[in-house]
Amino acid sequence: MNHTPDPATAENGGDFDPRQAAALLDQATWQARRTFAHPSPQLWVYRAVLVLVIFGGCWLSVRGQDPYSGPTPAIVPVIFSLVAINIAWSVWGITRAGAGVSGPAERKKHVWVAVMLVVFLAGYAVTAPLYHAGASHPVWGLYPASAPMLVIGLAGAAVAAAVRYWIIAGTLLAIAVVAAAAGFGGPVGEWLIMAIGMCAVCLGAAAVTAGQWRRSVMRP
Amino acid sequence: MTADELDPLIHVPTRLRIVATLAALPDGDALSFTRLQDMLRLTPGNLIIQLRKLEEAGYLVSEKTRNGSAQKTMVTLTKQGRTALGAYTQALRKLLGGLDTDAKAAEAGSDIVAF
């Protein structure tokens, strides 16, 4: 099945063997899936590294703090840089996948992206009144680590399920479960649970996406 | 089952690649001619010929839109085209299953001869 025929030779009068046809059908389908799909397994792996570095970095900076005073500001530039790369990669991926494509599913994807953008902003925007109200350090430390991801995970999973994006719905639901479990870890342990849990979820999403891409048309 | 029973409209490398590419899109979505050409690395002339054959069979529809002086052609796989690809894939599986069985029988036979 690894042998791929030379299309030009086969087109110009050569016999098109059924085995060659099966290999070409799989190859063309894989190529098309890779081109049209977003996010890619590589982007999921990057996101796994991103959450591990960000949440893990926060955990390292709060470990041993007594009293708890929150992550060190030194990690903020790292967070912004990694998130900026993630946003740039995502925008590039969405643009590339949707180039030259139009129709109901493509429009649905645009609505999904817009909704998720609002959910993300809303998830983190609720931390502002908390800060303004002068919340104590333990509360302030506990809340931003997992609560926004709990909100984003639950709301995003509901929206993804409504539009039948099952892999994304499952991933976001798993993120919500990790965030809910992390809430029991306390202000310090929560960062570590989020780092490991979210990293595992992103790696799982990468594996499932890669498996879907590579699924053979000929061997269902 | 023989290779002659495979849908002759799809059982051509270029047309198989076209149909498989369009089938990877969700039902009802269209792909621009230029993107399809870019993905398959075909000359415009060759692609037009193959698309016309598939369109005549009702496997796909193409729609031309004009935006100012630029003209854009969008290609969509029809339900009939999806069904035809599904039937072609099934037929190919059956045929290859038969070929594998024949090959195993031949191998077993050759082992006996060799022994």
Image (spheres, coloured by chain):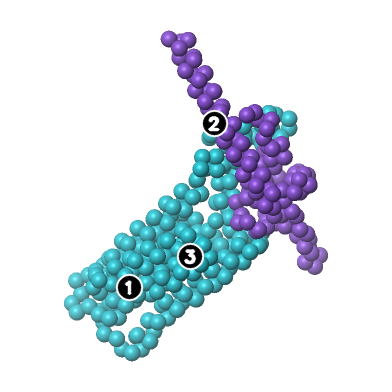
Chain colours: A cyan, B purple
Q: Earlier in the sequence, mark 1 or mark 3?
A: 1
Badge 3 crowding class, 10 Å Cα cut-off, few under 14, some 14 to 19, many 20 or more, is: some
Left or right of A98, for residue A199: left
Res. A161 mark: 3
Left or right of B34, for residue B109: left
Where is residue A182 shown, x and y percent of the image? Answer: 29, 69
- Measured in 3D between alpha carbons, the distance from the residue under mark 2 to the one under mark 3, in whole angstroms, is 37 Å
Tag 1 near tag 2, CB within 8 Å: no
- Secondary structure of residue under mark 3: helix
Where is residue B62 shown, x and y percent of the image? Answer: 75, 55
User: Does label 3 lie on the same chain as label 1?
Assistant: yes
- How many numbered markers are drawn? 3
Near-viewer residue (A22 or A163): A163
Q: Chain of mark 3?
A: A
**Residue type at the position of mark 1:** Ala
User: Does label 2 lie on the same chain as label 1?
Assistant: no
- Measured in 3D between alpha carbons, the distance from the residue under mark 1 to the one under mark 2, in whole angstroms, is 54 Å
Left or right of B90, for residue B48: right
Residue B77 in view in this figure: no
The residue shown at (60%, 51%) is B24
Quadrant in the picture for residue A203 = bottom left
The residue shown at (43%, 9%) is B115
- Secondary structure of residue under mark 1: helix
Near-viewer residue (A86 or A76): A86
Tag 1 near tag 3, CB within 8 Å: no
Mark 1 lies on residue: A145
**Residue type at the position of mark 2:** Gly
- Measured in 3D between alpha carbons, the distance from the residue under mark 1 to the one under mark 3, in whole angstroms, is 25 Å
Quadrant in the picture for residue A78 = bottom left
Residue B32 in view in this figure: yes
Where is residue A167 shown, x and y percent of the image? Answer: 46, 58
Res. B97 mark: 2
